[in-house]
Amino acid sequence: MKNLLDITGLTVDDVEKLLIKASAFKEGRALPTHPSHKLANLFYENSTRTRISFELAAANLAIPVVNFNSSSSSENKGEVLVDTMNNLAAMGIDLFVIRHSEEGIQEKLANDFTSNAIHIINAGDGQHAHPSQALLDLMTIRELKSHPIKVAIIGDIRHSRVANSLQSLFELMEIGELFLVAPKIWQPRKVHFGKVTSSLQEGIEGADVLICLRVQHERILESEQLNLIDYREQYALTVNNLKFAKPDAIVMHPGPVNRGVEIDSDVADGPQSVILQQVKNGVFMRMAIIDSLLAP
Ligand code: NCD
């Protein structure tokens, strides 16, 4: 693996190796160090979990990290991203974790930076992909459930890069059945895996895993607006709705959680929630990703 751009660039074997490596790191069974490498977090969109998770993952592997602040950078003076990267590479940075609103930008940059010494990790591109999130979600599911399972992704699927990457990963790894639950206006334009339904009950009936998504206001067009009170009434994960799923179903959310909108606090903090386990696993999965790029 030279870059991590999209789940579609991975094989079953790549994913299995990442899962094994991430678990070994979690159990403290192995701890490689890469002190001669340097990582830059280039985030052009807001982030808490993903940026800090990559920073901690690199620190755990003894890799120095620089955090680039797009609002105070020379890009405000007209410099383009590829020049920023060239300058950072001249200073010895060889790992670039990039989040950007432009879809496919990491892939374009990967085509510009063909040197084997430069590695690019996609930390989210617009509504397209968020591969490290999907991988840490699969790690969490695997710790708690064996395939085949029924998974439901619920909420604003149309604008979700997480839902997109999860579809690709669940298809690749043959996890079982996937339901994509959303009101008509937030249903995906393209589905590569899963059954779309606007019925929450149909989607979560007998499900083993419920993945709740944030309403992504920043990406919703005027014509796609929904009344949030109506949305909540029909689609929020509440203690009452959880009863449709299997009694031991797990509840997941990539964060940030909007309590009282897509999920109630009773559920987000309840006994079936594994949201913080996802966050914890994120550091180990990102260590596995970085280590696999450097030491395949
Ligand atoms: C997601 C993202 O940014 O795509 N969050 C995350 O990385 N954990 C989901 C979201 O913004 O709702």
Image (spheres, grey):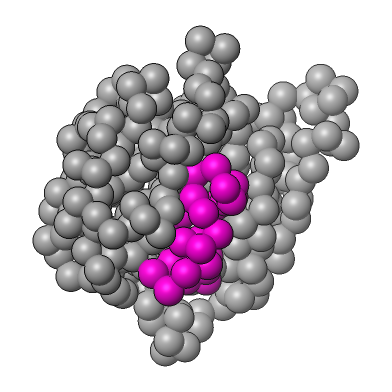
Q: Is residue 54 visible?
A: no
Residue 214 rendering spot, x and y as whole percentages: 51, 42
Residue 211 rendering spot, x and y as whole percentages: 37, 52
Observer-nearest of 58 and 194: 194
Which residue is at 27% across, 71% downward? 248
Which residue is at 53% across, 32% downward? 229
Residue 198 rendering spot, x and y as whole percentages: 28, 30
Q: Is residue 201 above or below residue 15?
A: above
Q: Write the start and end of the magenta stretch as one range.
A: 252-280
Q: Is residue 32 visible?
A: yes
Which residue is at 58% across, 74% downward? 61
Q: Is residue 8 left or right of residue 70?
A: left
Q: Is 21 contained in the magenta span?
A: no
Q: Is residue 278 above or below residue 205?
A: below
Q: Tell how many labels.
A: 0
In the rendered view of the protein, which quadrant contains the C terminus? bottom left
Magenta span dominant secondary structure: loop
Q: Residue furthest top?
A: 223
Q: Is 269 contained in the magenta span?
A: yes
Residue 45 rendering spot, x and y as whole percentages: 66, 37
Which residue is at 50% across, 83% downward? 31
